[in-house]
Image (spheres, rainbow, N blue to C red):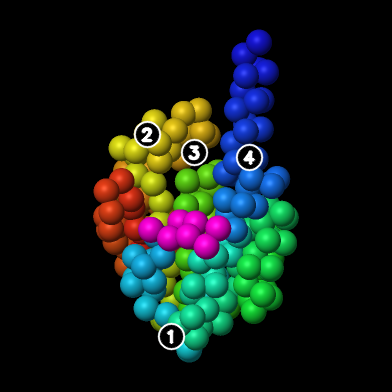
Amino acid sequence: MHWIREWRIDRMTDRVARKPHGRAARETYGADDVHAFAWEPVLAALQLTAADALLDVGCGGGVFLRRALETGCGAVGVDHSQEMVHLARRTTERRAPIVNAAADHLPFGREAFTAVSSIAAFFFFPDPVAALAEFKRVLHPERGRAVVYTTAPELKGTPAAPYPLATRGHFHEDDELAAHARAAGFRHVEVRRPDEGAQLLVARP
């Protein structure tokens, strides 16, 4: 019964990571240190100030948003899991609006933000170019910058990206990740390696 196995893998992937829900997901994505390894590389690349408006795409439980708000910036979170939206509103103590939406259909006008971040979510975006094109659309054309922290291909099948979950995500070589950003309309693109097995895409319009 191959289809039953595939359905179970999809269900597990959604519950645990792709569209988290349930008590275990709330505990994981609401933990004070969830994805903390990515915070400083992302913040260093963004260089947020009180003059910035940040959009965090795939914000999960909102813990990174809470950290970003310490810079004095304004911020908005987006997640396609309604349960994560509710959790992020509690985590941020409603200091940032949290919206239920998909990365490739952002419900914001053009040039609404000066910064976009996405941490450990890009892996699950079904159309990475469409998502990046939306990032560019909502960014200020001169001051805007987007930073994506994602898992590198060499970690496929390791504890950082274990099977069978790894079969439901999208891994990108460095040059492929950069090409996606350029295809989405970004002109200034760089892929950094802040940690072993991690990719940091830094893109500007």
Determine which of the numbered discs, if any, sits on residue 49 in the image. Answer: 1
Residue beneath the point at 65% across and 40% down: 15
Q: What stretch is highlighted in magenta?
A: 31-37
Q: What residue type is disc 1 on?
A: Thr
Which residue is located at x 33 percent, y 50 percent?
198
Report crowding for label 3: few under 14, some 14 to 19, many 20 or more residues within 10 A (C-alpha).
some
Residue type, mark 2 in image = Thr
Query: CA gap, disc 4 to disc 2?
Result: 19 Å
In the picture of the structure, the residue carrying the numbered disc 4 is 14
Question: In the image, which disc is placed on residue 169?
Answer: 3
Label 4 residue SS: helix
Rendered view: 63 above or below 102? below
Q: Quadrant of the C terminus?
A: bottom left
Residue neighbourhood size for the residue with mark 4, other residues' Cα within 10 Å, grouped as few (<14), some (14–19), many (≥20): some
Secondary structure found at label 3: loop
Q: Counting residues from the N terminus, which is met first, the one under dot 2 or under dot 1?
A: 1
Identify the residue under disc 2: 158
Q: Tell me the mark number nearer the camera, choosing from 3 and 4.
A: 4
Contact (CB < 8 A) between labels 4 and 1?
A: no
